[in-house]
Amino acid sequence: MIKINLLPFRAARKRENVRRQVSIYFLSILFLIMAMFYFNMNFNGRLSTLKAKEEGLRNELKPYIEINQEIARIRKQTKEIQSRLTVIEQLEKERVRPIQLLEEIAHAVPLNRLWLRSLAETGGKITLQGTAMDNDTLARFLTNLDKAPHIENVELISSKLQHFSKYKLDASNFVLTCQTRFEEPGKTESEKPEKKQPDRRR
């Protein structure tokens, strides 16, 4: 009977399996390293492309940024100019209003039958003091004032008869008040209340 010793063969096969496993292990590591290197290079390339694209977009936006800054500057200047124009317009109205009021009061006075001694204005309220030849003249003056475009709420505070012996006549000393009436800027024509023009007949 022939006997064969298989131990050396098994040992060699075992060593071969170990070498194969080690080789596979190192090849796997090498493959992973190469894959990581490849993906890293790919990502770096894509990152560089995106950075270059971002830089290009930034360069394209620069003119628009300058335009937006110029628009913002112009808007600021426009707002400042508008504010100044508003102030100038208000000052102009404040300058014109007293002239309009005096003209309307003068037109309301019956000629040679009524004389004003004083006129005072505080916070839109006007106080007038004067002398009228008679009550009818005073009533006509009140009516004319009430019809004035920029005067309203005319109210007679007092009326006192006084005898002027030098001229041999009686006259009425009176005190009356009224309010100024000016529309605020921006009101449309339909929003302005209608008021009749003053009676300019004396």
Image: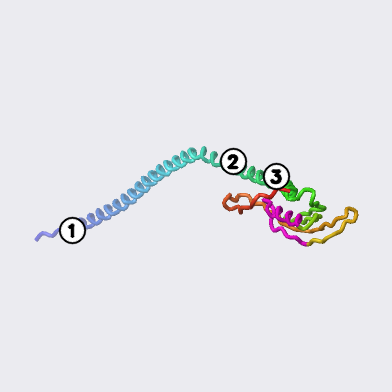
Q: Locate the N terminus by quadrant.
A: bottom left
- Left or right of 64 in this view: 102: right
* Residue 86 appears in the picture as rendered: yes
Q: Secondary structure at mark 2?
A: helix
Looking at this view, is 143 or 97 the one in front?
143
Amino acid of disc 2: Ile
The residues bearing labels 1 and 2 have C-alpha atoms spaced at a distance of 99 Å
**1 or 3: tag closer to the N-terminus:** 1
Q: Residue at x 70, y 55 (%)?
A: 143
The residue labelled by disc 1 is 6
**3 or 2: tag closer to the N-terminus:** 2
Q: Residue at x 31, y 51 (%)?
A: 28
Amino acid of disc 1: Leu
The residue labelled by disc 2 is 74
- Left or right of 63 in this view: 100: right
Foreground label between 3 and 2: 3
Q: Residue at x 77, y 58 (%)?
A: 135
- Left or right of 55 in this view: 29: left
Q: In the rendered structure, which segment of residues is drawn in magenta?
A: 136-157
Q: Are marks 3 and 2 in contact (CB under 8 Å)?
A: no
Q: Residue 62: horizontal and vertical position, in percent?
A: 52, 39
Q: Is residue 148 magenta?
A: yes
Residue 23 higher or lower than 65, as above or below: below
The residue labelled by disc 3 is 92
Q: Going by the picture, which residue comes out furthest to the front?
A: 168
Foreground label between 1 and 2: 2
Q: Bin the neighbour count of mark 1 within 10 Å (Cα to Cα): few under 14, some 14-19, many 20 and up.
A: few
Q: Residue 98: horizontal and vertical position, in percent?
A: 74, 48
Q: Residue at x 83, y 57 (%)?
A: 171
Q: Going by the picture, which residue comes out furthest to the left?
A: 1
